[in-house]
Image: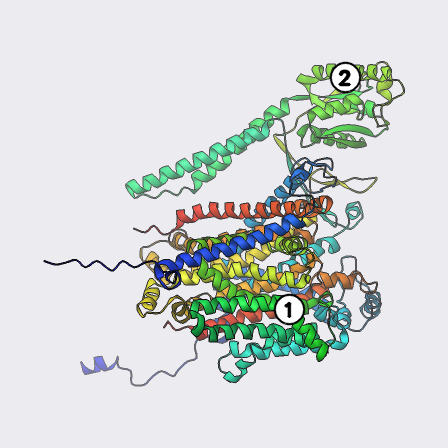
């Protein structure tokens, strides 16, 4: 009996074997991810064919490209000399990157005077310094003191002129803040709020202009002014895009709160504003800015086209943002509103401390995609005569005799720059979402 | 005895307007209302003071005076501005509709593939989505338009030895100056018969499906409706096609020829000359005549006409020499033609010296006797429908005859809008499918449902609730983005009403108001329609 049972007892372990070849490493990965079923195999093969077709013509075209030439015809001459002329279907053609090498400052800055290129570059650097403490909370908090000053410094660097203009404008905000801070004891909180709005507006309309002129006459400090017409390319896209983003966020929040408000007139006004701006394409608003805005203002007023565009782009983006933020507000459970009320907070306190931080967190993806949309839409300004990087400047470059007939190189260069900006923004929003995620998954 | 102490009646104090919450909201609203009205007064007052010529829509009735190459309805530069605006509106709706349909297909396709377990397919779709979402739409429109206008062959290259190839099995031609696609040409009445049959079979299909569903609900027995659907949708239409073809093929057509003698054959009549034949647009008879001429090797020139009556008139005026008419109507048409020519001749005699017709081919009706005679060859009307495909003219100015001409502006705009919006829809579809929790799939498998049923009956109905609302806003975005037509010169409503009309008449305010109003109303209608759909798929809560 004992013999029988002992025959089944293993006294030593079998040696370890390596797993089957198909279950390890690259082969396993390939089998699971590319060839797991007949359908998948077909899809994989089709994908490879597509990738091959796309890259087999693009890579030689791009990598054998010619960087050193002064015109398209010279480019073609060099190409014919190096690689021979392409056939009638265009095989064997190569890129002429020389146009980028020669004209990249124009694509970036438009017709901004080349001796002042340092000013937009510095302004751009300052913008990053100003926005860094907002984007990353690990940076020293002292940096944030510069943030409110940055718009005025950047404005002065870009447009130039006397230093007193931005100072006089900034003074208006200081006056408003002072009215709010010190007026509360004298005329009550509501009165102080009204004064904080009215007094700066009166100051800007009546006092700021003469004050600037007076100070500029006494102390002429300034740098060479640059006209708005000279702005172009990515400088223009960034100026319009960033101003639109910065200005539309507070306006969007205000509109969203207005749309959620119980006050009938304010609610209906916000609904009307949002629906009208969202229902009509941006191009139509841009044409409104260039054709109609003068009719709506007192005779003789004529202000900068770029400023008009910034205003309309801001209002347009604000209407979209308002809907995104309203979604966030609506997604909050009622208990949050009731909890804020039960703590005895007033409307603004509850919004500022309880509701908005949560609602904004929920709506981050929507807000950032609205910003990306706004930045991409800055290219539409070409239709009212501003020089955007995609069409305005590439048409301008093609209009010269040297570069007549060049398309793809310019499109690829500006497309790539746009991609970097927009993709960066969307990546940042993902980072922010992860950082702010407080729920446990 | 309890005494009820009344609260002390307090007089209304002005400060209550600010500090008393009962009145404060009224105060704020009154102030807001006052400010809004003040702003409105300021804006409207300025417009009244600044706007030259006052506010009036009378310019819409004036002659437009510009041409529109891509149009869905009749329009010439003699039409008025309102007609031009209508052409533009239809063009906008056309590209928006095509774009929405294509973008939905592309988006669903890419969204589903992006979730695929196949690594390379999902990567490829990610590249597509990120590439299109992060680059301005304007760039894609310009790139696709440049592909068409720079990289495609010239029309002349489609001639023998030109090196260009027809696409789509020889039926379509993509050229630098437009894309030429085949079109269906129906015989008289065939279109309506086939359409009626198709509608009836769709209705019958729905009824059968409802019956099968009812059967399953009653007995639990599942009958696959696919064979029934296929049979119902295909067999009646095919049968109708053959029946109609039999009828139209037996309808004899007579060829009327100007200046022919009775009993001449087509070949004898034509001789060595190039015939000028009276083409009727979208007419099977003309197509068949054209093919008869080609088969007989007779050179011909096309004199296009809008409809059959116009063709008879052109023929009677002598501007073309060959006309195909149904045999049953041949006599009456010949009588009309003789009558018309006689009247015209008498008028011409009365006003001697003044020539009415600008065409030089009028010799034969200047003769006293206009001889219009049927040729001895006859032909039939052809099948119920034929495919007319573009063909290059063998001699003369190179251009395409037959088929449908679609401007490259429309194609580029359509492709770019669909691909761009498709990338956004792909993300929406992906998010929608991912929003359905895995437990639903597992539960469905546990119930023994097949993967395809799980998708159709469990996942999709739940995913649709998440997908539809953002999908609506993507459709709205596409419609509004179609205003970028400006970049490629497609004549949408912004380019007609909001572009050339405003430039010509100077009525900027009215033009922009109408334009904005159109987009606003379109947006509201689309969102209303889609909201109805959305409420039909949304979660039914008790």
Residue A419, image quadrant: bottom right
Q: Residue furthest left?
A: B1
Mark 1 secondary-structure assignment: helix
Q: Chain of mark 1?
A: A
Q: Nearer the viewer, residue B25 or A406?
A: B25
Vertical arrangement, residue A62 with respect to residue B378, above or below: below
Local crowd size for mark 1, using a 10 Å CA cut-off: few (<14), some (14–19), many (≥20): many
Name the side, left or right, on which A149 lies relative to A290: left
Q: Nearer the viewer, residue B498 or B487?
A: B498
Q: Nearer the viewer, residue A356 or A38?
A: A356
Q: Is residue B260 visible?
A: yes
CB under 8 Å between discs 1 and 2: no
Residue B309, image quadrant: top right
Vertical arrangement, residue A383 with respect to residue A65, above or below: above
Compute the Cα span from label 1 to label 2.
Answer: 71 Å
The numbered mark at residue A239 is 1
Spot occupied by residue A163 in the image (x, y as percentages of width and height): 67, 77
Q: Is residue B122 visible?
A: no
Q: Which residue is mark 2?
A: B340
């Amino acid at each position: 009996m004992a013999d029988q049972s002992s025959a089944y007892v293993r006294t030593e372990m079998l040696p370890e074997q390596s797993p089957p070849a198909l279950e390890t490493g690259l082969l396993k990965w390939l089998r699971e991810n590319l060839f797991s079923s007949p359908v998948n195999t077909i899809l994989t093969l089709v994908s490879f064919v597509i990738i091959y077709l796309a890259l087999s013509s693009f890579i030689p075209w791009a990598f054998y490209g010619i960087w050193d030439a002064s015109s398209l015809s010279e480019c073609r001459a060099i190409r014919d000399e190096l690689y021979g002329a392409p056939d009638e279907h265009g095989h064997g053609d190569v890129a002429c990157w020389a146009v980028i090498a020669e004209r990249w400052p124009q694509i970036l800055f438009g017709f901004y005077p080349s001796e002042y290129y340092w000013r937009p570059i510095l302004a751009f650097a300052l913008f990053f310094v100003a926005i860094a403490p907002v984007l990353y909370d690990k940076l020293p908090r002292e940096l944030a003191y510069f943030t409110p000053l940055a718009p005025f410094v950047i404005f002065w660097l870009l447009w130039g002129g006397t230093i007193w203009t931005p100072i006089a404008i900034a003074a208006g905000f200081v006056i408003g803040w002072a009215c709010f801070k010190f007026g509360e004891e004298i005329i009550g909180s509501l009165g102080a709020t009204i004064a904080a709005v009215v007094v700066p507006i009166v100051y800007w309309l009546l006092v700021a202009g003469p004050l600037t002129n007076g100070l500029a006459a006494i102390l002429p400090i300034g740098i060479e002014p640059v006209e708005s017409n000279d702005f172009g390319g990515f400088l223009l896209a960034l100026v319009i895009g960033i101003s639109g983003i910065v200005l539309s966020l507070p306006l969007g929040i205000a509109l969203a709160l207005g749309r959620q408000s119980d006050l009938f007139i304010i609610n209906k006004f916000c609904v009307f504003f949002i629906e009208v701006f969202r229902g009509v394409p941006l191009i139509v608003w841009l044409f409104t800015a260039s054709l109609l805005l003068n009719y709506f203002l007192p005779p003789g007023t004529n202000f900068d086209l770029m400023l008009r565009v910034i205003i309309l782009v801001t209002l347009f983006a604000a209407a979209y943002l308002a809907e995104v933020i309203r979604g966030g507000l609506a997604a909050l459970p009622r208990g949050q509103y009731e909890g804020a009320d039960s703590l005895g907070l007033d409307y603004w306190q509850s919004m500022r401390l309880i509701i908005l931080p949560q609602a904004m967190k929920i709506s981050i993806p929507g807000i950032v995609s609205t910003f990306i949309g706004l930045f991409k839409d800055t290219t539409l300004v070409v239709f009212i005569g501003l020089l955007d990087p995609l069409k305005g400047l590439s048409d301008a470059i093609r209009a010269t005799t040297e570069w007549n007939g060049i398309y793809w190189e310019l499109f690829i260069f500006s497309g790539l720059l746009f991609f970097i900006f927009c993709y960066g923004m969307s990546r940042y929003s993902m980072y922010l979402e992860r950082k702010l995620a407080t729920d446990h998954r | 005895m309890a005494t009820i102490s009344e609260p002390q009646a307090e007089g209304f104090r002005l400060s209550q307007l600010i500090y008393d919450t009962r009145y404060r909201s009224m105060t704020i609203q009154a102030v807001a209302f006052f400010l809004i009205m003040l702003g409105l007064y300021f804006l409207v007052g300025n417009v009244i003071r600044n706007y030259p010529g006052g506010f009036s829509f009378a310019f819409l009735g004036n002659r437009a005076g510009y041409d529109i190459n891509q149009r869905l309805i009749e329009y010439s530069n003699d039409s008025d501005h309102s007609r031009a605006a209508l052409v533009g509106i239809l063009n906008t709706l056309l590209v928006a509709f095509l774009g929405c349909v294509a973008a939905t297909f592309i988006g669903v396709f890419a969204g589903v593939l992006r979730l695929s377990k196949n690594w390379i397919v999902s990567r490829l779709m990610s590249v597509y989505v990120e590439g299109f979402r992060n680059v301005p739409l304007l760039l894609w429109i310009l790139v696709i338009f440049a592909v068409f206008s720079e990289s495609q062959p010239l029309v002349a290259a489609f001639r023998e030895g030109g090196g260009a190839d027809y696409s789509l099995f020889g039926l379509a031609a993509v050229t630098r100056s437009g894309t030429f696609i085949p079109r269906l040409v129906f015989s008289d009445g065939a279109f309506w018969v086939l359409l009626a049959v198709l509608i009836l079979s769709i209705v019958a299909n729905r009824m059968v499906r409802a019956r099968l569903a009812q059967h399953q609900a009653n007995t639990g027995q599942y009958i696959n409706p696919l064979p029934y659907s296929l049979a119902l949708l295909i067999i009646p239409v095919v049968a109708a096609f053959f029946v109609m073809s039999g009828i139209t093929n037996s309808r004899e057509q007579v060829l009327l020829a100007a200046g022919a003698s009775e009993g001449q054959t087509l070949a004898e009549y034509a001789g060595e000359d190039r015939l000028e034949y009276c083409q009727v647009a979208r007419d099977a008879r003309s197509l068949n005549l054209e093919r008869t001429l080609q088969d007989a090797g007779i050179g011909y020139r096309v004199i296009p006409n809008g409809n059959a009556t116009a063709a008879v008139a052109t023929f009677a005026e002598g501007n073309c020499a060959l006309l195909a008419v149904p045999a049953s109507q041949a006599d009456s048409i010949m009588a009309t033609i003789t009558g018309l020519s006689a009247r015209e001749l008498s008028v011409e005699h009365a006003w001697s010296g003044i020539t009415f017709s600008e065409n030089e081919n009028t010799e034969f009706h200047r003769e006293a006797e206009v001889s219009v005679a049927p040729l001895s060859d006859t032909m039939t009307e052809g099948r119920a429908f034929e495919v007319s495909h573009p063909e290059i003219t063998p001699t003369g100015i190179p251009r395409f005859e037959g088929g449908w001409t679609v401007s490259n502006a429309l194609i580029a705009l359509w492709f770019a809008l669909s691909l761009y919006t498709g990338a956004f829809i792909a993300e929406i579809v992906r998010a929608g499918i991912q929003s359905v929790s895995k437990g639903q799939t597992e539960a469905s498998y546990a119930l023994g449902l097949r993967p395809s049923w799980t998708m159709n009956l469990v996942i999709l109905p739940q995913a649709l609730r998440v997908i539809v609302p953002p999908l609506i806003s993507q459709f709205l975005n596409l419609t509004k983005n179609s205003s970028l037509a400006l970049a490629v010169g497609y004549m949408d409503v912004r380019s007609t009403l909001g572009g050339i009309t405003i430039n010509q008449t100077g009525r900027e305010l009215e033009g922009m108001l109408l334009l904005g109003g159109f987009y606003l109303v379109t947006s509201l209608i689309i969102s209303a329609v889609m909201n109805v759909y959305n409420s039909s798929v949304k979660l039914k809560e008790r």
